[in-house]
Amino acid sequence: MTDRRIGAVTFLVNDYDEAIAWFRDALGFALVEDTPLGGGRRWVLVSPGDRGTPLLLAEASTDEQRARIGDQTGGRVGFFLHTDDFARDHARMRAAGVRFNEEPRHEAYGTVAVFEDLCGNLWDLIEPKLA
């Protein structure tokens, strides 16, 4: 059997430290790695937990990259944060200032609500329905 998985997903940000603080404080992510690469660049990984795919926070360095901050998926929900307790995480995130674009709703696949990250990208907070 082959062991394959996505190791990380690049996530464009304005500033490394601002993004680290937001993911840590607003979403409860852990800082997995922060390694200087020289020239002001860093290898910064944040993760929602032990089994979650980390985000590689990439500070935009060109006008083209800066234009993509907050619109990495063309206005669609592009990131999906799964939780085992929607009510707990929704309340904690709201208390931390996370902006939800809708009230929680119940779908066939679980409980979900769309929120915006610090850059304006859209995410789903989802508690999947148990099979």
Image: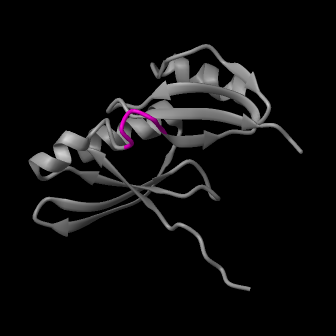
Is 82 drawn above or below residue 26 in the view shown? below
Q: Quadrant of the N terminus?
A: bottom right
Q: Is residue 13 left or right of residue 106?
A: left
Q: Is residue 113 magenta?
A: no
Residue occupying the far top of the picture: 103
Residue 54 appears in view: yes
Is 70 drawn above or below residue 35 in the view shown? above
User: Image quarter for residue 83?
Assistant: top right
How many numbered marks are there? 0
- Residue 22: x, y in percent? 39, 35
Is 55 drawn above or below residue 76 in the view shown? below
Q: Is residue 75 magenta?
A: yes
Name the residue located 41 percent from the left edge and 32 percent from the top edge. Answer: 117
- Residue 35: x, y in percent? 30, 65
Q: Quadrant of the C terminus?
A: top right
Name the residue located 45 percent from the left edge and 40 percent from the top edge. Answer: 24
- Residue 20: x, y in percent? 36, 44
Q: Pick whichever, 21 or 120, lies toward us.
A: 120
Q: Is residue 100 left or right of residue 14?
A: right
Residue 14 appears in view: no
- The colouring scheme, among rainbow, by chain, secondary structure or one colour, is one colour
Name the residue located 35 percent from the left edge and 29 percent from the top edge. Answer: 120
Q: Is residue 24 left or right of residue 15?
A: right
User: Image quarter for residue 93?
Assistant: top right
Q: Main secondary structure of the magenta part?
A: loop
Name the residue located 61 percent from the left edge and 76 percent from the top edge. Answer: 4
Q: Which residues are magenta?
A: 73-77
Residue occupying the far right of the picture: 131
Q: Is residue 48 left or right of residue 99?
A: right
